[in-house]
Structure formats: structure tokens, C-alpha cells
Image (cartoon, rainbow, N blue to C red):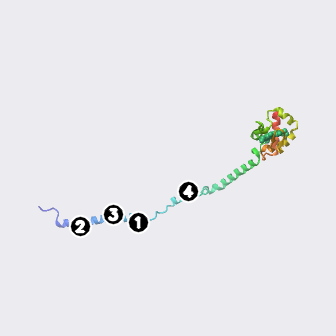
Amino acid sequence: MSSPITKTDLEFLKRFSMLIGVLALMAVAFILLALYIYAKQPPAASPAADKVVADRLAPVGESYAGETGRAAMLAAEEARKKEAASRVAYGGTTDGKAIYDQLCSACHQSGAGGAPILTDKAAWAPRIAQGADTLIKHATEGYTGRAGIMPARGGNPSLNDEQVKASVLWMIDQVK
Ligand code: HEC
């Protein structure tokens, strides 16, 4: 029984599949070579990615140059306000009660250090008899009497004359 494939055809098929095989091997070799070269190559620089990195590295505030001046101005304004407020006690209020509540009451509410208590009319009567000017002077310059030590300006040197006067007058009003 003779094969339907002739000898020549068989030879052709043999060579042809060998050729296909070699080409396939070469294809694989080229793929591997390409991968190798690709791995060796530094990655291409992307301008978009570079910008993201640069933005992240930029110091805070510098990436918004337009806002920098405004932010500095606001900070300076804030610092100036704080500084001004700290130079004048209690925001410069001349509300005697406010000053008393925040400072004088520390002693004159409890009687700490022998301070005459604000509600003690008997303790205040002889003091008030000295006259408001003397009381203001004593409160401003400080005063050491038999009861104890009244510190100058209630112990807060940033309290100005007007504020001391206002608080003394307010206290006098309370014990009258
Ligand atoms: C650290 C405690 C203390 C604080 C704070 C204080 N005082 Fe006095 N104050 C005294 C004492 C103690 C006396 C009594 C002194 C004495 O007569 O021996 C006194 C007395 C006075 C007198 C009477 C002075 C006199 O001639 O009799 C006045 C007025 C007065 N204080 C006002 C104030 C005012 C206003 C403040 C707040 C700005 C203030 N004090 C804060 C302790 C204090």
C-alpha cells in the first residue's frame, strides 16, 4: 500500500517544519532579547509625573506664589493685634467690673492676703473715708497697711492708670 504523500512531499514537509521551528525559536529569542534591553533602559521621563513630584517637594506656600504675600500680610496683622493686646491689659478695657473680675477679685473676693472683701462694708467704710483719690493712688502705687499688701496695679504692671482708676471707682460703687 503506497502512501498518498510522495517522497518529495515528505522531504518538503520535513524541511518546512524545521524552518517553522527555527523561526519560532528565533521569535522567542527576539522576545527575550527585547525584554532584556527594555529592562536595561532607564524609564522614559514623563513631564506630568515630574511635575507631580516637583509639586510635592515644593515647600508649603511656595507652589502658590500668588497667595504668599497675602498669607504673610495676614500673619503680620495677627501678630500686630496680639502684640497690641498684650501691651494693654485685658484688651485695654476701662470697664471696672471686667478688670475687677479678671484681676482684683483674686484677692478682694476671698480676702486672700488680708485684702478687704468687696462685700464687707465695715472694712471699706474707713478706707472710702480717705477719699477716692487716695484709694486710686494706693491701688496704683501699691500700699502696705495693717491688713496686708496691696500690690501696685493689682500686680499687673500692664494695667494703665485709667484702668486702675476705673476698677477702684467700680469697687467703691459696690461698697457704698
Ligand atoms: C494680691 C492680692 C490683691 C490683689 C490682686 C488686689 N488687691 Fe487691693 N488690696 C489687697 C490688700 C491685702 C489690701 C489691704 C492693704 C491694707 O490696707 O493693709 C488691698 C487694698 C486695696 C484698696 C484699699 C487701699 C486703702 O487705701 O485702703 C483698694 C482701693 C484696692 N485694694 C484696690 C484694688 C484693685 C482696684 C485691684 C485690682 C486692680 C486690687 N486691689 C487687687 C490685696 C490685693
- Image point (75%, 39%), residue name: 106
Looking at the rendered image, the disc whose residue lies closer to the viewer, 1 or 2, is 1
- Image point (70%, 53%), residue name: 76
Q: CA distance from mark 2 to mark 3?
A: 20 Å
For label 1, count other residues whose C-alpha is less than 10 Å away and answer few (under 14), some (14-19) or many (20+): few
> Horizontal and vertical percent for residue 145?
84, 40
Q: Do labels 3 and 1 touch, CB within 8 Å?
A: no
Q: Which residue was labeled with disc 2?
A: 15
> Horizontal and vertical percent for residue 58?
58, 58
Q: CA distance from mark 3 to mark 4?
A: 43 Å
Q: Quick one: label 2 or label 4, which is nearer the N terminus?
A: 2
Q: Secondary structure at mark 1?
A: helix
Label number found at residue 28:
3
Q: Quick one: label 1 or label 2, which is nearer the N terminus?
A: 2
Disc 2 residue type? Answer: Arg
Q: Nearer the viewer, residue 122 or 36?
A: 122
Q: Which residue was labeled with disc 4?
A: 56
Disc 4 residue type? Answer: Arg
Q: Do labels 2 and 3 touch, CB within 8 Å?
A: no
For label 4, count other residues whose C-alpha is less than 10 Å away and answer few (under 14), some (14-19) or many (20+): few
Looking at the rendered image, the disc whose residue lies closer to the viewer, 2 or 3, is 3
